[in-house]
Structure formats: structure tokens, C-alpha cells
Amino acid sequence: MTPALSCDRFPLFYWLLTLLARATSAGKEILLAAVLGTSPWKDALVAAWTAPALVASYGNETLPALLTPAWARSASRPVRALVGSVAAAQMLLSVAALLWPRALIALVAPGLTGAAWTGAIALERWLALNIALLGGQTMLAARWNAQRRFGWMPAGTSCAAATVLAALALTPGMALERRIFWIGGAITVGNVLGLVLMLTPALRRGARRPAAPSGAAAVTVGGGAKSHWPALGVLLGATLVLNLVPLAERMAASGLHPGSLAAFDYGERLVQMAFSVTVAPFTAVSFTRLAEAAVPGRAAPPAFAAHFEAAWQGLLTLIAPAAAALAVYARLLTRCIFGWGRFGAASVALTAPVVAIKGAGLALDAAFYFLLFAIYAQGRERSKLPIAVALAAANLPLLFWWARLWGVAGLAAAHVAGCAAALAWIGARHRRYLPGLRCCAGIAAGVRAGGLAIAAALGVRALLPQAALAGGLGGAASCGWAALALAATALLTAAMAALWAPELWTGVRQALAPAPGLAAAGGRP
């Protein structure tokens, strides 16, 4: 694995590793859907995994905001006390989940009954350790990203998917009530292996430590130039508010029609696959670029502004067509990816609306995610709390109301509405959160790209067989039509952009491979 990757051009090696990791994860989700469908055992697995995932997200949504800029700007190790304290806290939470699984499941999925309820409690004991494991992976990813070693994160996170695939391959024909515990154990073993893999660079002698960029202020913890402890407290509070949303979604889904919790989880995971191979790696690289160029506490310098505006426009241009495709081909894609084995027509019908609605909102998710990291890079982490409150204030009342009206589709719609509310809050306070940065050109580019992609997708959709669009064909036929539809939509969108909006291609190229002058201005160490 390459020790360091350039930030001047988007690291193709990193993207290929991410693509491989997501392909492994997609294979895992497809086989799990075929084995579990929307059965009570899938509901049990979702409920048992919710607690480790939610608690681990405190690390995912707070630590990179503090650690990556600190490590990117300083050759020292200024945040060791913070890392040690957080790791200890996550281990204690893992122990608590192991000792009191019944209370945890009662909190996250109070509507579960029967086999789903008892299965979730038993599975929690197998999955509790993942709170600490995922937290450790997050901190290591922040460390290696700051050193431009982007490939270690997807390499480590793919291990759990690989071990689940192995467990499924070793247990054909086993009863579900036994097989589900093999799956839970495989997740934990995989994350142990992932953590060990991500520790490899730290164990190598002479590991590269990046020099601090010229002009960057050193950042320390505990009595130095800047203490991270108050910022961490605010970020934890903001993450608590944000985590009320997925917690409430699980609570609401667990009280709907049987299988609704599983269907909502499948829909989320399908959209997350698209997010993980596009938005997440692009933003991780951009965050390192921005953190290196930023001067905390001051207005954005020219290099920061140039990187931000190029990346912002490129991201929205690329993600808007993906959102259009998910929205237009939701049922076909759901049938193609999950429609195997126990995941029958009823499961496809229950899951597809989640994919369509959350897929249509993918561009909003991408914009929100990117802007948050741009705010973090400037040292404005404390701004996350009012943003989180704005999102939760819009989402939480709507999700319970709309879930009663429209089921899992209502939950997906509330998610999109909450994200739109948070973006509106950031836009209204643009001068405070993003001073000196221009967003309008990027938004206009995303709208143009999305409009072209919607027109292309609707045109291609009109030519497809209705049976394929309705998910009524066999698995192989559905996959063939899905591949044809996506390829035709991409080609038609690209052709229309070349004819009527060539500037979109220029923006994408500038985001992925900044001009030499821009790279030099970024203060690359």
C-alpha cells in the first residue's frame, strides 16, 4: 500500500480501494437480503446493530473534525490525551452494552416483539464490542488521512464485510436462529481484523510524519495554543442531537408493519452505497486539502477559498446525476441489488420508496456533509450544535407524523426535510459559518447537472419494459436492465452536458485535478 498519496489530484488508488471495499459490502448486503429478507431476524440484527452504530457515530462525527486538522497542521502528536480518553470511554460503553443489552434494545426498538425482541437482545452481546472497535478505526482513519494515507480506511473497514461473506459461505442450510449468531460474530471478528490492519502503519519503523505547512499554527490540547476539550464537548452535544434522528427512525419503524424496520435499513444501505463511493472519499480528500490551507480563527485565505469553491462545485455536479438515477430507477435497482432469495416482491415494494426518496435527497446529504467538514477545517467546530438543532427540530416531529401517514416512505421524506432545513440554516448564516466563500456557482452547477440527468433518466425510463421498472422480472434480467439504464442515462447526460453546459466538465476536472497554480497556493507540505 502506498505510504502517502498526493492531495493535488484526487487519489485514484484511494477511490479504487473504496470501490473495492464498497463492492465487498454490497456483496454482504445482497447475501444478507437473500438469507434474511425482511424477516424478524433481520429486524433483530438491525436493532442490535443500532446501539453500537449510534454510539460509534459519536466518534465518526466528532473526532475527525478535531483530529485531522490538528494532525494535518502539526508534526507533533498534540491530541494524545484526547484520543486516550475517548478510547477508554468507548471501551466502557462496549462493556455497558454487553452487560445490559435488554435495556439498550428497549431504548432503540421498543416496538419489537417475539423472535425479533429476543434475538436482538442475544445479538447485542455479540456486537457490543464494536462500539470500541469502530471508534478505534475512526481515530486511526483521521490520523492516516492527515498524513495523506487515504487507502488504509477503506482497507480496514472492508474486513467486516469479508468475514460476514465467509460466515455465510460456511453456514449454508443452517437454521436462521443459529445462523444469525454466526453473522453477528463475523461482524465483530471482521472489525477486530480491520482495527489490526489499520494499526499496521503505526507499527512500521520510520513511519512518515508530515511536516507542518508553512504559516500554519500549531494546535495542541490541554494548555496549548488551542484546547480541543471545549470543542469536543460541543461536538458531542451536537452529535447527541443528530443521533436522536436515527434513534427515532428505528423507534418509529419498529412500531410499523412487520418488516418495516428491515426495509428502512435496506433502503438506507442502498443509498449509502452510492454515498460511500462518491461523496465520502471525495470529502475526505477535500477535508485534508482544506485543513492544510486553513488558518483557524481567521477569514478563509485565498488558497482555502479556491479549494473550497472548486471542490464544492465538482461535488454537486457529480452527485446530482446519481441522485436522479436513484430516484427514477428506485424499484429496478432495489430488485437488482436485494431481490434474491427471501427478499421477495413484498420486500421490494416496501423498500423501493425509501430508496427513491432518500436517493432523491442524496445531493442534499452530500452538500450538508461537505459544508460541515468545510466548517470544521476552519476551526469552527462549535457551529455544529445550532446546525444539529435546526436539523432535528425539522426532522423529529415530521418523522413520527409522516410515519403514521406513509410508513417507511414518510420516514425517508422526513430525513430529506431535515437535511433541507439544516442547509437553509447554514445558508441564512453563510457569512458566519463560511465567511468569504462563494456557494452560488456550485449550487447552480448542481442544479444544471441534476436537471440534465433527470431529463436523461426519464427519457431512458420511457423506453424500458414496464415489467423491469416494476421489479417483476427475474434477478439476472433486472440486473441487465439496470446496468443498461444506468449506462444509457450516464452517456445521455454526458452528451447533453457537452452540448449545452460544457462548463460542468471544466468544474469537475478542476475539482479532481486542481491546476498547478491552485495546488501550489494550497501550501502543500
Image (cartoon, helix red, strand yellow):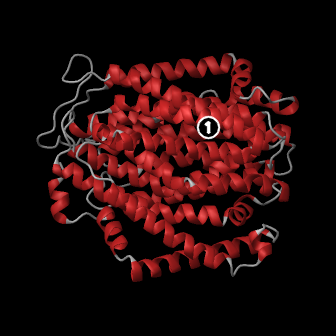
Q: Residue at the spot x=26%, y=49% of the render?
A: 437
Secondary structure beneath label 1: helix
The reply, left or right, for residue 473 in relation to residue 234 is right
Of residues 482 and 151, the one nearer the viewer is 482
The amino acid marked with disc number 1 is: Val
The residue positioned 85% from the left and 37% from the top of the image is 177
Q: Position of residue 14 (x, y in %)?
A: 40, 57
Q: Left or right of 100: which side holds 17?
A: left
In this rendering, the answer to whether 75 lies above or below 226 is below
Q: Position of residue 59 (x, y in %)?
A: 46, 31
Q: Position of residue 117 (x, y in %)?
A: 81, 28
Residue found at x 46% / y 82%: 495
Q: Is residue 20 visible?
A: yes
The residue that appears at 64% across and 40% down in the rendered structure is 187
181 left or right, relative to 243: right
Q: Nearer the viewer, residue 49 or 301?
A: 301
Residue marked by disc 1: 189
> Residue 126: x, y in percent?
69, 30
